[in-house]
């Protein structure tokens, strides 16, 4: 675990999850320091607000999108988004030249984009966990090393950690959900102590390529809909328990719809693609983190990705 710092009672990152009918959307920003803001007010919780803003900026700034595409597991503070974008553009041009030009590439069905393709689930999960965990000048986190760095190879092995969760701190879980063919990040904010950790409210961040159980999903689409609202940790605990016990996609369709489909539309869930039990399972990386470190890491990426510093050939509207 790294960056284990508790937030004082008056910290804007410490949440009292008691909804108030007196707080409105118009004073969302001031709700950061106000008592009892609405549970669904994304402007109140620092981490989810940062992810929401980053998702919006990614739609306009190809350099930020490029940062998500780097999957080398180096320290996020060493990323150079504009250089990654140049490499992506150069690789695409080499492909165009190899097949005989842009028209030939289009005829062959090769996707040509002025900006990087939206990050797939693993890229988004890795980028965000690096942003939460990596510290300047220190060894970067490697989510593939499941035997170290807060790794758990099954949900049953994670349960004891969740039972003893320190609710005064910010806790992050990266989930590799192999039966679902998906990776996502669970953000557990500091909040009032709960006798049952399952009663704690959490935010989930995800994208999806759309080639499996769930439909295509961009980070902004998720944050514009379900991603801005917290859910109970118990909802994921129930799903993980059922998945690890071997239940089929058909029996898990309600959980899959409620947790991962942005519109809660079961017709968009292809439960038949859910892998059979025993083939693959769940893996977790759990960390207690400093939210200010996350904020600083994202701000660093933003500064390196400023539009005005991009080469003209890489800008797009």
Image: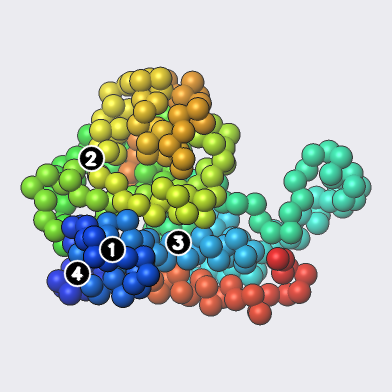
* Disc 3 packing (10 Å; few <14; some 14–19; many ≥20): many
Whether residues under marks 2 and 3 lie with C-beta atoms below 8 angstroms apart, the answer is: no
Q: For residue 289, which numbered disc appears in the image?
A: 1
- The residue under label 3 is 52
Residue 17 location, quadrant? bottom left
Whether residues under marks 4 and 3 lie with C-beta atoms below 8 angstroms apart, the answer is: no
Q: Quadrant of the N terminus?
A: bottom left
Which of disc 1 and disc 4 is earlier in sequence? 4
| Residue in view at x 53 percent, y 62 percent | 56
Rendering coords of residue 192 (x, y %): 14, 58
Which of disc 1 and disc 2 is earlier in sequence? 2
Answer with left or right where residue 48 lies relative to residue 39.
Answer: right
Which of disc 3 and disc 1 is earlier in sequence? 3
- The residue under label 4 is 35
Estimate the spatial distance between the alpha carbons at disc 2 and disc 3, rounded to whole Å: 24 Å
Rendering coords of residue 81 (x, y %): 59, 68
SS category of the residue bearing label 2: helix
Q: In the displayed image of the protein, which residue is found farthest to the left? A: 195
| Residue in view at x 32 percent, y 65 percent | 24
């Amino acid at each position: 675990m790294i960056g284990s710092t508790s937030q004082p009672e008056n910290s804007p990152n410490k949440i009292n999850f008691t909804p108030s009918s007196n707080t409105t959307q118009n004073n969302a920003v001031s709700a950061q320091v106000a008592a009892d803001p609405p549970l669904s007010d994304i402007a109140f919780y620092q981490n989810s607000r940062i992810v929401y803003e980053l998702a919006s900026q990614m739609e306009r700034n190809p350099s930020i999108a490029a940062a998500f595409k780097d999957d080398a597991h180096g320290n996020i503070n060493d990323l150079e988004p504009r250089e990654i974008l140049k490499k992506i553009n150069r690789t695409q041009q080499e492909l165009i030249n190899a097949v005989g030009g842009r028209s030939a590439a289009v005829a062959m069905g090769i996707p040509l984009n002025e900006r990087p393709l939206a990050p797939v689930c693993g890229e988004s999960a890795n980028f965000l966990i690096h942003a939460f965990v990596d510290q300047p000048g220190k060894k970067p986190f490697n989510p593939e090393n499941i035997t170290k760095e807060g790794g758990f190879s099954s949900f049953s092995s994670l349960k004891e950690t969740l039972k003893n969760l320190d609710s005064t701190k910010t806790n992050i879980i990266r989930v590799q959900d192999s039966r679902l063919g998906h990776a996502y990040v669970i953000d557990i904010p500091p909040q009032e102590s709960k006798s049952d950790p399952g009663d704690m409210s959490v935010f989930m961040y995800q994208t999806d390529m759309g080639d499996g159980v769930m439909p295509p999903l961009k980070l902004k689409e998720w944050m514009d809909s379900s991603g801005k609202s917290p859910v109970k940790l118990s909802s994921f605990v129930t799903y993980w328990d059922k998945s690890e016990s071997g239940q089929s996609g058909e029996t898990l369709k309600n959980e899959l719809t409620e947790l991962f489909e942005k519109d809660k539309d079961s017709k968009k869930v292809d439960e038949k693609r859910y892998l059979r039990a025993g083939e693959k399972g769940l893996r977790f990386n759990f960390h207690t983190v400093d939210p200010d470190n996350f904020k600083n890491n994202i701000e660093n990426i933003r500064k390196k990705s400023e539009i005005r510093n991009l080469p003209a050939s890489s800008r797009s509207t």
